[in-house]
Image (tube, rainbow, N blue to C red):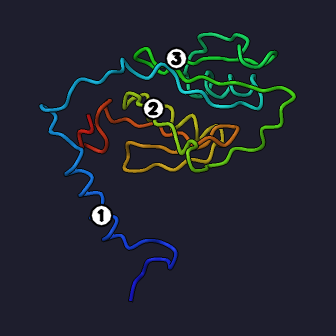
C-alpha cells in the first residue's frame, strides 16, 4: 500500500526522472563552461509598506539600505535596495494605489530567497528573530526559514556560498 497522497506522483518515478536529467544535463565541474552571467544584480520583491520593509530588513536582519528612488515603471512607486553582500542586492517596489493583493506562492512565483550569512552572524540573527517574535524554523542547524512582513519566505543559511548542507552545489 502506498503512503503517498493520491494526487502526488510516485517518489521513485520522480527520483528516476531527476537521475535522467542529471545524466543528460549535469556536466562534471571541470567540463562546465563559464557562465555568461557575472552574478545576481538584484532580486525584486513587492512591499506593501516601504518603512515597515526598511525596518525589517535593515534593523532586524542588518542588511543596509543602499538606495531609495522612484520606480521608473510606475510613477510614485518606490524602488529600494538592500546590500546582501558580495555586490548583490535585494530590491523592493511598492505600488501605491494599485491593489496587488497578499503574497502568494504560485507557479512561476517566488518560493523563497536564501541568503548566505557567516555562522556567527547566523546565530545572532536567529536570536534577533526570536526576540522580535518572528515565527521561524531552524533546519539542520545552518538554515532558518521565516517570512517577511508581507509574507515572502526567506532563508538565512550559514553554509558558504556554493555549498548546501555540506554538499558542493557550485
Picture residue at 69% right of the left edge, 24% below the top? 93
Q: Describe residue 67's horizontal placement relative to residue 71 as left or right.
A: left
Q: Describe residue 13's horizontal placement relative to residue 42 as left or right.
A: left
Residue 159 in the image, given as x and y percentages of width and height? 33, 36
Q: Describe residue 53's horizontal placement relative to residue 96 as left or right.
A: left
Q: Quick check: 86 above or below 95?
A: above
Residue 11 in the image, given as x and y percentages of width and height? 36, 70
Q: Quick check: 106 above or below 5?
A: above
Q: Which residue in the structure is indicated by mark 1?
A: 15
Outermost right residue:
97
Picture residue at 39% right of the left edge, 29% below the top? 120
Picture residue at 56% right of the left edge, 42% below the top? 110
Q: Quick check: 29 above or below 20?
A: above
- How many residues crowd mark 3 within 10 Å: few (<14), some (14–19), many (20+)? some
Which of these two is toward me, 125 or 8?
8
Q: Which residue in the structure is indicated by mark 2?
A: 115
Q: Quick check: 39 above or below 164?
A: above
- How many residues crowd mark 1 within 10 Å: few (<14), some (14–19), many (20+)? few
Separation of marks 3 and 2 at Cα, in angstroms: 11 Å
Pointer 1 or 3: first along the chain? 1
Q: Which residue in the structure is indicated by mark 3?
A: 83
- How many residues crowd mark 2 within 10 Å: few (<14), some (14–19), many (20+)? some
Pointer 3 or 2: first along the chain? 3
Task: Examine the image and state in which quarter residue 99 appears.
Answer: top right
Q: Describe residue 19's horizontal placement relative to residue 50 as left or right.
A: left
Amino acid at each position: 500500500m502506498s503512503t503517498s497522497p493520491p494526487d502526488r506522483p510516485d517518489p521513485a518515478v520522480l527520483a528516476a526522472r531527476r537521475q535522467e536529467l542529471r545524466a543528460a544535463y549535469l556536466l562534471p565541474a571541470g567540463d562546465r563552461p563559464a557562465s555568461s552571467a557575472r552574478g545576481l544584480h538584484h532580486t525584486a520583491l513587492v512591499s506593501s509598506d516601504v518603512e515597515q520593509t526598511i525596518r525589517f530588513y535593515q534593523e532586524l536582519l542588518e542588511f543596509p539600505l543602499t538606495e531609495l528612488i522612484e520606480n521608473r515603471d510606475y510613477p510614485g512607486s518606490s524602488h529600494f535596495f538592500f546590500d546582501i553582500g558580495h555586490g548583490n542586492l535585494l530590491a523592493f517596489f511598492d505600488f501605491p494605489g494599485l491593489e496587488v493583493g497578499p503574497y502568494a506562492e504560485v507557479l512561476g512565483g517566488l518560493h523563497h530567497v536564501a541568503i548566505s550569512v557567516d555562522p556567527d552572524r547566523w546565530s545572532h540573527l536567529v536570536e534577533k528573530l526570536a526576540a522580535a517574535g518572528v515565527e521561524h524554523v531552524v533546519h539542520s542547524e545552518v538554515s532558518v526559514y521565516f517570512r517577511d512582513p508581507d509574507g515572502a519566505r526567506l532563508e538565512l543559511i550559514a553554509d558558504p556560498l556554493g555549498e548546501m548542507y555540506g554538499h558542493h552545489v557550485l
